[in-house]
Amino acid sequence: MHKLVKISFFSSIFLCIAAILIVIGTYFFIRTELPEINLVDESELQMPLKVFTIDGELIGEFGEIKRRATDYEDIPVNIKNAFLAAEDDNFFNHQGISYKGLIRSFIRCLSSEGCEGGGGTITMQVVRGYLLTRDQTVIRKIKEIYLALELEGNISKEEIFELYVNRIFLGNRSYGIEAAANTYFDKGLEDLTISESAAIAALAQLPSRVNPVKDPRRTIQRRNWILSRMLLLNYIDQIQFDEAISRDLRVAKNINLYNVEANHIAEIARQEVVKRYGLKAYKNGWSVITTIDSSSQNIAKKSMMKHLFDYDKRHGWRDPDNYEKLFNKNQIESLKNLNLDFLNDESYISNKDLSKRNISNILSSIFENHFYYKGYRKGLVIYVDEDQFAFIDESFDIKIVDWTNEYSWARNRISINNYGPKPNNFKEIVNFGDLIYLKESQGFFSLDQIPIAESSLISLNPNTGEVIAYLGGKNFYESTFDRVRLSYPQSGSSFKPFIYSAALNNGYNLSTLINDAPVVFEDQNLESAWRPQNYTGEFYGPISLREALTKSVNIVSIKLLRELSIDKSHNYLENFGFKKSRLPNDLSLALGSGNFSPLEMSRAYSVIATNGYIPDIHFINRIEDRFGNIIFSQNDFDIRKNINAFPWLDTLEMNIKRPYYLLDALEKKEKVIDERVAYLMKDVLKGFMKNGVAGRKSAFLNRDDIGGKTGTTNSSISTWFSGFHKDLVTTVWVGTDDFSSLGENEYGSTIALPIWLNYMDFKLDTLDIYEDPIPDDISFVRVNKSTGEIDTKAINNFYFELFLNENSN
C-alpha cells in the first residue's frame, strides 16, 4: 500500500512537472509568433475620416470601419451591465481566462464541432479581436490564453473593457457601442434605455443573425434573455425588468445618423480631402471642420422640405405603390383584422420566395424598398373605412388615422395641371396594400406624400466666401446628385440684374424709359422670328429701368441687351464670374436662357451684395489629425498669401495648403464692377422685396436691408430665388430632374421664394440691421416721370432717382 502511495505521489509530481514544462515549452514555441502587447492601443482603432460643422456637429464619417471611441467613465452603467450579463459577469474577478469555459472550448476544438465560439472572456475577446487571426485552431486558442494573461498584467480591467466596447462589431458597419446606439436607435449612449442597452449587447455574438433590422424577433429573444440575466445578477430590479421587457424594439431604419443633414457637403469634403492626401485620410482619424453652421443648415433643410411638401399638395394626390399582390388570402385577412399573431410565426423565415414567406418578412422587404425621410413614418395600409384607415409601420405597430377635412387636398392627380374632385372619405384616397408616408407630430399621424420636385440651396458669406448652408437635394439617400454644384438649369429672370448692371455701366440710368410693347425680333442666331411676352401677358408701355426690373418685364431686358450688343454684354458679364464660352449668343440671354449652377448664381449675386467684390467660395475651415494638430487651416492660408516677400510660398507646399474651393478661384482682390453700379442694383433689388412680386410675401420680415430676385423659366421647369444681405447671399432652386413642368401658376415667387423667406426669418436674427452708405459720386436727382429725364425745375409729376454723377449733369 505504502509503495502504491509512493508511486502515486511521484507520478503526480512528474505529471505536474511535465504539465509545467509543456506550458513553458509551448509558450517559448509560440512566443515568436505572438504580437507585442503594446499593439493594443488607440492607434489600432483605425478612426475614420470625420466631417464636422464649424460648431462641432458631426455630419459625415468615411472609411470601411465606422467607430466612435468612448472612455470608460463615459459608458452608462446599463450598457456596462448588459455586456457583463451577456458576455462575462465574472470579468472584474478573474485573471483573464475562465477555466470552465476553456475546458468546454478545448473539448469542442478536439471534436468535430471545431473551435468556434465559447470559452471567451471579455479579455480573450479583446486579444482575439485586436491581435489574432480568425483561424479556428487549438494553437490560436492557446495564443489567446497567453495574450489574455499578459494583457491583464499590463493594463487595468477598465481599460480592457473600454477596448472591448470600442472595437466590437455590432452589425450594419457599426463598430463600438456609440456607433451602434446611433445606427439602431438614433441616440447617444447617455439616452439609451435599459431595453435598448440590452438590445445592443444582444448583437455581440452574432450580429449578422441577431440583428434588429434584419430579424427583430430574434433580437428581442436575445434581449429578453440578457434582461433576465441582469435581473438575476441584481443589476436591475423587478420593476425595471418588467418595464424593459415590455418595450417594443423601435429601431431607426434607414436612419440619418447625424443631428445635422449635410450629406452633400460632407461628400464633397471626402472627395477633395482624399484627392489631396490619398487613401490614408480614411483611417488616420482626421477631422475635417467645414464652414457649415449647423443651425443654418437645419433651418434650411426644414424650410426646403416644408415648402416642397406644400407645393406637392397643391397638385393633388398621386397613387402610391401598392403591394397587395405580395400577400395570400389568409395573410390579407389577418392584416385586415389587425391581427398581429404573425409576429410569432417562424415558418418560412429564411425562404427567399416572397409568396412563401411570413407576413413580417414581406413587410420588411416592402419598407426596405422605400427611402427614409426625417419626420415621416412609412406605413402599409391594412384597413380602410370611410372615416378612418389603419396602417402598420416598420416596427410592426398599428396606428389609426381619422378623417378630417384637411384631406380635401388629396384630389386624384390626373396630370400636373389636371385633378379629380375633392375626396369625401379615405376610400377615395387609399387602398389596402398602399405604401404611404405619414407626418408624425406629437403622437398623431397625418397622411402625406413625398414630393417629386427637387430643390437645392446654398447660403454663403459674400465677404469671406465661407459656405454657411448647403443642400444638394431634398434627400441624399434617395439621390446623391449635387444640384448646387453640378446642376446647370436655365437661370430665368434671376439673371436679369446682371443685364441691367451692364446697362447702368454703359450710360443708362434707372430712370431711363424703354417702351414695353409687342415686338418681333429677327435674330440671326435664332431659328425663327421671336415674339416674347411678359409672364403677366400684359404690356406696360414706356417704363423706367427700375420699375421694369421690379416687375421683371421681359421686353425691356431684351431691348437693353440688343442696344448694348451681345459682345459688350458678354465682356461685362464675365465680371460676375460667368464664362463667356457658356453665355448664349442670342437675345434670349436677356431672359436667362443661360445654364448656370446655383453655386455660380450665388457668387454672381455676391458681387452686388459686396458693392463689387467677387468671392472665392470655400467650405473647409481646417483639418486636424486625431491629436488636434493642424493639417490645413484656411486662416493660415489667408495670412501666407498676403506675405509677398516670400515668392517660394506659391509652390507645392502652398498648393497643398490651398483652400478647398467649390469653384475655380478667381483671386480678384480688387472690385470687379463699379461699386456705384453695384449700389444702384442693390437698391433696385431691395425695392423688389418691397414692391415687386416678393413685396407682400416678404413684408413679415420687416427689414429694409435685404434684396433679391425671383426667376422662372419657360413652362415653369425651373424656379429660382437669389437674395442677399450684406453678410449673407442665398440662392434657392426648385425644379425636376427630368425637366418636366412644375405646373401652371408655379413661379419663383410661389416655390423658391417661400423657402428663402422661411430660412431668412431665422437668419435675420443673426444679421445686423444696416443702412448702406451711398458711395461717392452718386446723387439724388429730380426726374420727370413722363420722360425719365432729369428735370430740376419740375414741380409736378416728378420723383427723385439715384444717378451716377457723370450722368446727372
Image (cartoon, rainbow, N blue to C red):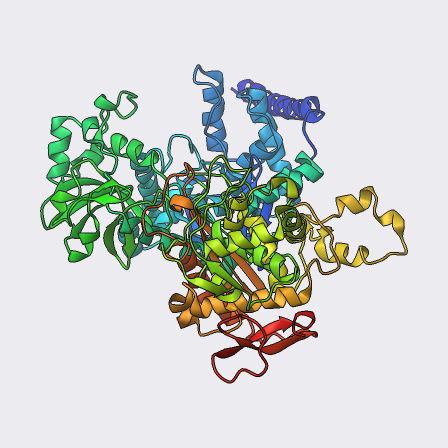
* Nearer-the-camera pick, 441 or 790: 790
- Judge from the rendering whether residue 223 lies leftward or rightward of residue 765; answer left or right: left
- Judge from the rendering whether residue 208 lies leftward or rightward of residue 74; answer left or right: left
Number of dots carrying numbers: 0
State which quadrant residue 792 falls in: bottom right
Residue 595, percent across and down?
A: 53, 43
| The residue positioned farthest toward the right in the image shown | 645
Q: Residue at x 40, y 72 (%)?
A: 700
Q: Is residue 461 above or below residue 252?
A: below
Q: Is residue 331 above or below residue 777?
A: above
Q: Residue at x 62, y 72 (%)?
A: 803
Q: Residue at x 48, y 73 (%)?
A: 703
Q: Residue at x 39, y 39 (%)?
A: 202
State which quadrant residue 757 falls in: bottom left
* Nearer-the-camera pick, 755 or 286: 755
- Judge from the rendering whether residue 661 lies leftward or rightward of residue 692; answer left or right: right
State which quadrant residue 749 falls in: bottom left
* Residue 74 visible somewhere in the drawing: no
Residue 199, percent across and down?
A: 37, 43
The quarter in which the C terminus is drawn is bottom right
Residue 168, percent across and down?
A: 51, 38
* Nearer-the-camera pick, 767 or 685: 685
| The residue positioned farthest toward the top in the image shown | 112
* Residue 515 visible somewhere in the drawing: yes
Residue 294, percent across and down?
A: 52, 58
* Nearer-the-camera pick, 592 or 757: 592
